[in-house]
Amino acid sequence: MHDVFSVVELLENISTFADKKSNANNACVCKLWSTVCLASLWRDVDDLYRLFRILSPLRETMYASQSTKYVRA
């Protein structure tokens, strides 16, 4: 790997402009990239369902009142 790809400040700057899917893919490159890209991914969590799904598996259910609820799987 070229030395420029191991400059943490440069990787942090790039990861702030990349979208979430790109950062998730970049986190699989190596340990250094993983640390930087995962930090960028977790900086702003905008989907609470996705966060709770990681913490405890949930499944979506529909009740008679047509409201959606999530229960533990």
Image: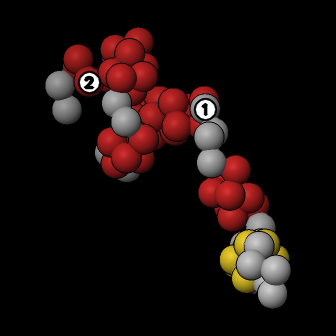
Residue found 74% across the figure and 58% down from its top: 52
Q: Residues within 10 Å of mark 1 (few under 14, many from 20)?
A: few
- Front position in the image: 15 or 49: 49
Give the quarter of the figure containing the C terminus: bottom right
Q: Residue furthest left?
A: 2
Q: Which mark is residue 1?
A: none
Measuring from the top left, give residue 6's x and y in whole percent. 32, 23
Q: Position of residue 70 (x, y in %)?
A: 77, 72
Which is in the foreground here, disc 2 or disc 1? 1
Cα gap from disc 2 to disc 1, whole angstroms: 24 Å
Q: Please state which of residues 72 and 55 is positioned toward the viewer in this rendering.
A: 72
Please tell me the numbered disc located at residue 44: 1
Q: Is residue 65 left or right of residue 21?
A: right
| Residue 67 horizontal/vertical position (percent) | 77, 73
* Position above or below: 14 against 19: above
Q: Is residue 26 above or below residue 54?
A: above
Relative to 66, say whether 46 is above or below. Answer: above
Q: Which residue is mark 2?
A: 5
In the image, what residue occupies the spot 23% across and 20% down?
A: 3
Q: Nearer the viewer, residue 47 or 41?
A: 47
Q: Residue furthest top?
A: 9
Query: Dot 2 surroundings within 10 Å: few (below 14), some, or many (20 or more)?
Result: few
Q: Secondary structure at mark 1?
A: loop
